[in-house]
Image (tube, rainbow, N blue to C red):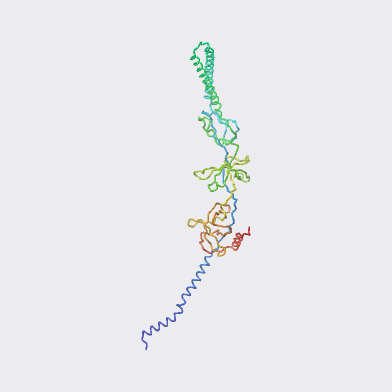
Amino acid sequence: MRTAIEKRFSGAHVKARAWSPLILSLPLIGVLLGCEGEAKVEQENVRPVKAVVVGAAERDRMLTYSGVVRPRIESAVGFRVAGKIVQRLVNVGDRIEIGQVIARLDDTDLKLAEGSAKAALASARTRRDVAIENFERARTLLPKAFIAKATFDARKNEMDAAVGAFDAAEAQLSQAINAVGYATLRADKAGIVTAVRAEPGQVVNAGTPVIALAGASETEIAIAVPEQDVSRLTAGQPVDLTLWAGPGLTLKGSIREISAQADPESRTYAVRATVHEPPASIRLGMTASVLIKVQDATASVVVPLTSVTDIGGDTVVFVVEPGSRVVRRTPVTLAAAAPEGVRIARGLQPGDIVVTAGVQFLRDGMRVRLAADVEQRASNAKSPHVK
């Protein structure tokens, strides 16, 4: 007879043999369940996305800037002498012609100075005439030895001094007469009054601005161009101009001047565009739109702005591989804005499939689902036979 211990071990052995097939099948079941889970996860990770096939960027592109109508020359006009303003004859917005009176000063003191200068000139003329007569007399007496040589020399010096004093008095009278004329401020060029800076009753110094006069000869549009675009502009380059007050009218112009130094605050460059044949409706200070066509040699493709994102400080887009339909994070270099999105200088080629929506939910290597016609368009775009 078997002992109790042998019976116990025998029973345990039988039970172990009964459970052995189940235990051996557990790893296989786990593998099958794992594969099924992975397939399910992989199926769940196939994300439908919106994508476009990028095309080659046009080399010609339009730069658009807002500008202000300005005169080419704007002068601060003032009196050439000091005095009290008694009359101002123009107002802001008036068109004035050459020689038109702008303002007048009280010329009382100036006329008194003119009278004094006339009297000084008369006195100098008398002294000059007397000195000339004395010299002529001495020149006659010297050969006869009636006067000494020293006396002759003294008479000659007196005559020279009197002639010099007369010339100085004559010049001072001319200055006094001019000063009286300067009391009337006249326009030396045609233009438009853009500002009034002095009023009647005000005492002004010589050169103090009374009005600001914009020359009527040329009208320009002043714009501010950022530093990334200023290198594409040249003097004489044609531009198209549109006034916001008259959007249906397109004017022709050309770039006249490009500043050599950027503004220290805005870091933009001042550019002036001359308006060819400005219409009568144009007014100084109006807002205008300036369109300039430039050649862009850096941008290769254009993508929608929603395609671009920032990951870890890098500017990237997600490109879909046509065969595997897997997205790849692709660093790109931006060139400039475009009407249909943003221009890409480096990183993409025409025909690439770029995700345009939901890029923040993608990761490198994720499978996606595309529209049926996207891959066909990508194949056509990269084909050398398709224009």
**Callout count:** 0
Point out the image quarter for the N terminus: bottom left
Q: Is residue 127 above or below residue 360?
A: above
Q: Nearer the viewer, residue 323 or 369?
A: 323
Q: Nearer the viewer, residue 342 or 194?
A: 342
Q: Is residue 83 above or below residue 303?
A: above
Q: Nearer the viewer, residue 16 or 86?
A: 16
Residue 278: image x %, image y %?
A: 62, 40
Residue at the bottom extreme of this rendering: 1
Q: Is residue 331 above or below residue 143?
A: below
Point out the image quarter for the C terminus: bottom right
Q: Is residue 352 above or below residue 86?
A: below
Residue 64: image x %, image y %?
A: 58, 47
Hey, which quadrant is residue 105 in on the image?
top right
Residue 290: image x %, image y %?
A: 59, 45
Hey, which quadrant is residue 9 in on the image?
bottom left
Q: Nearer the viewer, residue 167 or 212?
A: 167
Residue 106: image x %, image y %?
A: 53, 26
